[in-house]
C-alpha cells in the first residue's frame, strides 16, 4: 500500500498500491467493499473531495446512500476523478471522468 484516504464522513477509506489498484474498505464492518484497476502503473496519491452528495429527501431513492468524489494520481501521469457511491447495502466505485 502506497496511498490511503478516508471518506469525509469517516467510516470508509480507500487504499492504492504499486500495482495501480483502488480498494474501498469499510472500517465498521472490517470488509473490502470494492476493487478497481485504477492506473497502469502505481498509485501515488488519493484525495476525497470534502463535499458529500446525495441523501437529500427530494432525491432519496430509499437506499440511504451518499456519493463522494475521489481524485487519484498515478505513476502513469494521469489524474482520474471517481465517484464513490455508498449505500446502506453496499459500496461501489465507478469512474465518472478519466482524463490524462
Image (tube, rainbow, N blue to C red):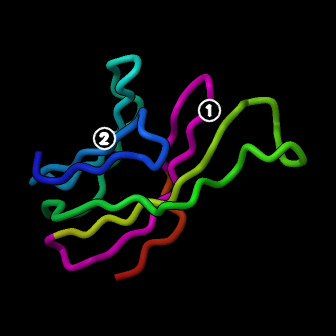
Marks 2, 1: nearer the viewer: 1
Along the viewing direction, whichever of 82 and 12 lies nearer the viewer: 12
Left or right relative to 56: residue 40? left
Q: Position of residue 90 (x, y in %)?
A: 55, 27
Q: Is 33 left or right of 77, judged from the image as shown? A: right
For this orientation, the residue located farthest to the bottom is 100
User: Of 34 and 13, which appears nearest the observer?
Assistant: 13
Question: In the rendered image of this protein, does residue 91 appear above or below residue 51?
Answer: above
| Quarter of the rendering occupied by the N terminus | top left
Residue underneath mark 1: 87
> Outermost residue toward the top?
29
The answer to which of marks 2 and 1 sits earlier in the sequence is 2
Q: Residue at x 41, y 58 (%)?
A: 48
Secondary structure category for the residue under label 2:
strand
Q: Residue at x 14, y 64 (%)?
A: 41
Q: Which residue is mark 2?
A: 23
Residue 3 belongs to the span the image colors magenta: no
With 32 as the anchor, is 54 left or right in this view? Answer: right
Q: Secondary structure at mark 1?
A: loop
Classed neighbour count for the residue bearing mark 2: other residues with Cα under 10 Å, few (<14), some (14–19), many (≥20): some
With 82 as the anchor, is 46 left or right in this view? left
Name the residue: 71% across, 32% down.
Answer: 64
Real-space CA distance between mark 2 and mark 1, rounded to the nearest whole angstrom: 17 Å
Does residue 39 sit above or below 5 in this rendering?
A: below
Seen in the picture, residue 66 relative to 45 is either above or below; the reply is above
Quarter of the C terminus within the rendering? bottom left
Give the magenta range. Answer: 75-93
Q: Was residue 90 drawn as part of the magenta stretch in this picture?
A: yes
Percent x, y for residue 72?
31, 64
Task: Pick the residue in front: 21 or 69.
Answer: 69
Badge 1: residue crowd in 10 Å (few <14, some 14–19, many ≥20): some
Amino acid at each position: 500500500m502506497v496511498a490511503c484516504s478516508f471518506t469525509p464522513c469517516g467510516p470508509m477509506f480507500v487504499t492504492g498500491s504499486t500495482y495501480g489498484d483502488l480498494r474501498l474498505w469499510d472500517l465498521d464492518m472490517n470488509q473490502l467493499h470494492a476493487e478497481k484497476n485504477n492506473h497502469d502503473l502505481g498509485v501515488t496519491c488519493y484525495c476525497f473531495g470534502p463535499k458529500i452528495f446525495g441523501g437529500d429527501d427530494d432525491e432519496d431513492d430509499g437506499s440511504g446512500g451518499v456519493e463522494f468524489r475521489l481524485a487519484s494520481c498515478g505513476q502513469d501521469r494521469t489524474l482520474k476523478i471517481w465517484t464513490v457511491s455508498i449505500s446502506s447495502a453496499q459500496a461501489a466505485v465507478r469512474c465518472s471522468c478519466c482524463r490524462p
